[in-house]
């Protein structure tokens, strides 16, 4: 029986590409070779290429996402396993392109990807479903900024973050009004739109949710205890945080978090891996954001949660491929 060709697509156009390469390697190593022929595809700003077992690069034909090998044989992929963090794999660009050429892929579609990559729009949609979030102000580059009014409305400390960015890039915790302008500059370096949010003084948790075996399940709830001011890039990827799975929550709070995480996932029409972040304050989970292509390196939260839940990485990844193969 012919094995399906699966391209593990990694890389990306943002600083997150390094994390994506690690995530892609874990998925590449974990997919069942008895079921699939597995290939590495790297997408970077200046080149898209297939990498063979000898580390030889072959360019991707963008007309149909195929590869022409040395012997003029054409390699096509039955499924693309999308594990790009940030642009273009998490914001809908790649999904729209694949839809146009008829290429099957894992994860959510163009609309869900574009929506969840936009923090402001995600929180606005979820508020209609009764999912609470911090008080916020949205600004675009060039907008007139009244710093006193911002502080009056949101209080201090507050957070300044890019509206469309991942891995906590460009985020600042602002404690005084004098720190606002440097924080704006830092966030605008990542995106032309920024979000200012009131500080929520509570327990931060990261919740892995996936549709597995036809059912939406919470893989786990991980408590985040940053050594820094908040769960920034260094805390996420350079070991400067303590991640406790399962989170130290009482049963009532845990059930509340699980219910809200599933409700958010289903309300947005999600598919595939997701990791959503919440601050629990006075027993209420406030959503910060949802990631549709969360980190999947061995040190990442989602693989840790799957292990504790009892789902192997092979089964978790295989489930994504099988769902993608049945898509119309």
Image: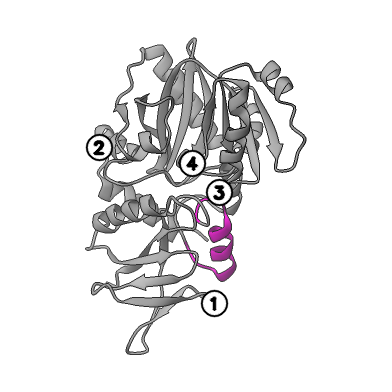
132, above or below 61, in the image: above
Of badges 1 and 4, the one in the foreground is: 4
Of callouts 1 and 4, the N-terminal one: 1
Tell me where residue 288 appears, x and y as whole percent: 53, 29
- Quarter of the image where the N terminus is located: bottom left
Query: Looking at the image, which residue sits at the far front?
Result: 178
* Mark 2, residue position: 307
| Few, some or many residues within 10 Å of mark 3 (<14, 14–19, 20+) | many
Q: How far apart are marks 2 and 4 (CA)?
A: 28 Å
Quote the CA–CA distance across marks 1 and 3: 22 Å
Q: Mark 3 points at which residue?
A: 113
Q: Name the residue under label 1.
A: 63
Which residues make up the magenta segment?
89-104
Point out residue 281 in the picture as x, y percentages from the top left corner.
49, 14
The percent position of residue 23, horizontal first and vertical second, equals 33, 51
Q: Name the residue under label 4.
A: 169
Q: Alpha carbon of mark 1 to alpha carbon of mark 4: how far?
A: 33 Å
């Amino acid at each position: 029986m012919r094995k399906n060709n699966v391209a593990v697509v990694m890389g990306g156009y943002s600083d997150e590409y390094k994390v994506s390469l690690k995530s892609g390697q874990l998925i590449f190593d974990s997919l069942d070779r008895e079921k699939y022929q597995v290939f590495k595809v790297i997408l970077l700003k200046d080149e898209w290429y297939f990498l063979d077992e000898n580390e030889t690069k072959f360019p991707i034909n963008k007309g149909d996402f195929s590869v022409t090998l040395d012997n003029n044989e054409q390699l096509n992929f039955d499924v693309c396993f999308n594990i790009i963090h940030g642009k273009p794999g998490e914001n809908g660009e790649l999904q729209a392109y694949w839809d146009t050429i008829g290429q099957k892929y894992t994860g959510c579609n163009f609309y869900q990807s574009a929506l969840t990559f936009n923090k402001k729009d995600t929180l606005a949609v979820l508020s209609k479903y009764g999912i609470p979030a911090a008080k916020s102000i949205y600004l675009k580059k060039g907008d007139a900024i009244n710093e006193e009014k911002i502080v009056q409305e949101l209080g201090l400390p507050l957070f300044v973050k890019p509206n469309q960015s991942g891995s906590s890039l460009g985020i600042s915790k602002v404690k005084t009004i004098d720190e606002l302008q440097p924080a704006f500059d830092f966030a605008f370096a990542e995106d032309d739109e920024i979000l200012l949010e009131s500080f929520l003084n509570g327990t931060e948790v990261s919740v892995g949710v996936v549709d597995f075996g036809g059912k939406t399940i919470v893989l786990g709830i991980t408590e985040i205890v940053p050594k820094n001011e908040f769960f920034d890039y260094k805390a996420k990827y350079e070991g400067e945080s303590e991640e406790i799975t399962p989170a130290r929550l009482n049963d009532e709070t845990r059930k509340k978090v699980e219910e809200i995480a599933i409700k958010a996932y289903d309300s947005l029409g999600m598919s595939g891996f997701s990791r959503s972040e919440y601050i629990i304050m006075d027993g209420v989970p406030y959503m910060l954001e949802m990631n549709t292509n969360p980190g999947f390196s061995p040190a990442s939260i989602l693989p840790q949660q799957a292990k504790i839940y009892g789902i192997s990485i092979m089964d978790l990844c295989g489930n994504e491929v099988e769902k993608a193969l049945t898509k119309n």
